[in-house]
Image: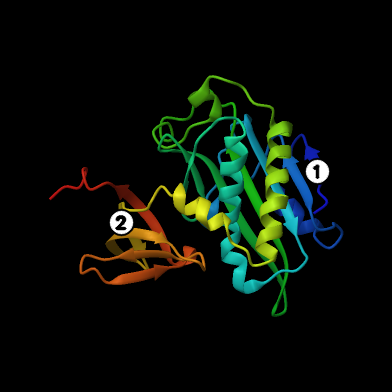
Amino acid sequence: MNFSVTTFEEIDSTNEYLKREADKLPQGSVARALHQTAGKGRRGRKWEDDKDSLMFSLLLKDNLNPDRVSLLPLLTGVVLYETLEDYGIQTSLKWPNDVLLHDKKCCGILLEGMSEGSSLKALILGVGLNLNAKRFPPELEKKATSLYLETGKTYDGKEVLNHFLTHFDKEYSKYLANKDSYLDILRKHSYLDGKKVLLNYYGEGKEVTVVRVEEDGRLKVVDKENKPLYLNAGEVTLESVYSHQNETK
């Protein structure tokens, strides 16, 4: 894939920019922001812009298969894992769209689709990676971290983005050929496997144990009666994660 990167000093949201310009821009267009005034997270949440993040979005328009769209955030998580591994940083992947470093979130992924009638017109893949933040607000400091806080080193956003695009090109080519070997990497470094999770499942609280990510990208879990459930990302919110050792009786 040919990538074309445009960097903005300030913009509302890189996802929104690519939505507005999708008809004019080619496949592989990348919008990067040094500051976002209205950054977006999953489920309508705001992405906290600490001005030390790598924030960008990628436009996909060609060879879109609606049946495989749900795999793209998982693929992107693996690409981020590979990108940070280039720097000697080992992360874990939390289904469906988070990258964790020492049990704290360092990166989030947001996938948005654009339709025309009943057809999928484009996909916008947004990434926010905490690079050089030295602190977080009190409400986030136990949940979020940055590469700087974990390694004591500063990172060049342009260089990290180039590493990401190199790995994305490789994995996306496999994805288009229905070769989903990246799922093996996801499973190997899955944060949730074997853990007990409290779900908000269609408004109902449900305690389950995570088994694995399936070939179609769904999360297989079992409930207290050992009954299997297969979860799509849009069906659930993970309210909390706790190990067997931390389980209270």
Q: Which one is nearer the viewer's eye here, 46 or 178?
A: 178
- The residue beneath circle 2 is 198
Q: Position of residue 156 (x, y in %)?
A: 69, 27
Element on which disc 2 rests: strand
Please state if 24 lies on the left or on the right of 163 as rendered: right
Question: Residue 69: which quarter of the image?
Answer: bottom right
Q: Is residue 223 above or below residue 80?
A: below
* Image color mode: rainbow
Question: Residue 107: which quarter of the image?
Answer: top right
Please state if 104 lies on the left or on the right of 155 as rendered: left
Q: Position of residue 172 (x, y in %)?
A: 68, 57
- The residue beneath circle 1 is 5
Q: Residue 23: which disc?
A: none
Q: Amino acid at mark 1?
A: Val
Please state if 247 lies on the left or on the right of 41 as rendered: left
Label 1 CA crowd tier, 10 Å (few <14, some 14–19, many 20+)? some
Residue farthest bottom in this picture: 118
Q: Position of residue 50 (x, y in %)?
A: 59, 32
- Quarter of the image with the N terminus is bottom right
Please state if 60 lies on the left or on the right of 207 as rendered: right
**For the residues marked 2 and 1, what is the alpha-carbon distance in whole angstroms?**
40 Å
Q: Is residue 233 visible?
A: yes
Q: Is residue 168 above or below residue 120?
A: above
Please give the name of the residue rendered at 21% of the width and 43% of the height, measured from the top-left corner. 245
Residue farthest right in this picture: 24
Please give the name of the residue rendered at 53% of the width and 54% of the height, measured from the top-left corner. 42
Q: Position of residue 93 (x, y in %)?
A: 48, 47
Q: Amino acid at mark 2?
A: Leu
Q: Is residue 40 visible?
A: no
